[in-house]
Amino acid sequence: MTYLTIKWMHVISSTILFGTGIGSAFYLLAASIGRDARTVARVSRLVVLADWLFTTPTAIVQPLTGYLMMRLTGFPVSSPWLAWSIGLYVVAIACWLPVVWLQMRLAAEAQACAVSDAGLSRRYWRLMSAWIALGVMAFVAFVGIFWLMVTKTL
């Protein structure tokens, strides 16, 4: 594989990873603000599905293609911009893993609320608060990574 092919895969997968994250966050947050448990149950199931279909594969492709580009270009992992990018990626993924679990809990809780024809529960909102906090941290980490990848400076 040539460097440009690997770089193209890296850029496309980062776009899918970031775009899916932003889109999922927007739709789940917008549905939650609407407070209709049936709508939230449907949207949260789709957000979980999107994570498995799009986020998971791209979260795997990113470090693989990044490593291959490092090898092909000879960039040492000790380059400050690269070391920071890797560190921020670890932070973002460390936030994302519990987010996946939280999304599954949010979907189950919203479904239970919809079945009982109740509003969204306090438990739902506690889970949502944690989901938002982790999502914001991952978003900031990804924005930092994009900056570092484009500028290759600190």
Image: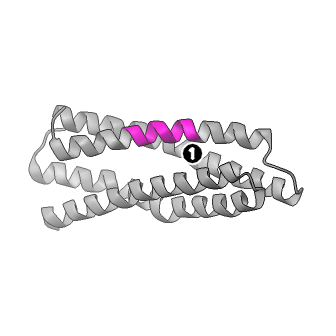
**Magenta region includes residue 83:** no
Is residue 16 visible in this depiction of the protein? yes
Q: Position of residue 42 (x, y in %)?
A: 69, 64
Residue 138 to residue 73: above or below: above
Q: Residue at x 51, y 42 (%)?
A: 135
51 or 6, nearer to the observer: 51
Q: Which residue is mark 1?
A: 99
User: To which quarter of the image does residue 64 belong?
Assistant: bottom left
Q: Residue at x 32, y 54 (%)?
A: 62
Q: Quadrant of the N terminus?
A: bottom left
Q: Residue at x 14, y 39 (%)?
A: 76
Q: Is residue 56 found left or right of 2 in the rendered image?
A: right
Is residue 104 visible in this depiction of the protein? no
Q: Residue at x 86, y 60 (%)?
A: 115
24 or 58, nearer to the observer: 24
Question: In the current view of this chain or complex, which residue is farthest to the right?
Answer: 116
**Magenta range:** 132-140
**Magenta region includes residue 134:** yes
Q: Position of residue 130 (x, y in %)?
A: 61, 36
Mark 1 surroundings: few (<14), some (14-19) or many (≥20) residues within 10 A = many
Question: In the current view of this chain or complex, which residue is farthest to the front?
Answer: 34
Q: Main secondary structure of the magenta part?
A: helix
Q: Position of residue 49 (x, y in %)?
A: 58, 64
Q: Position of residue 140 (x, y in %)?
A: 39, 38
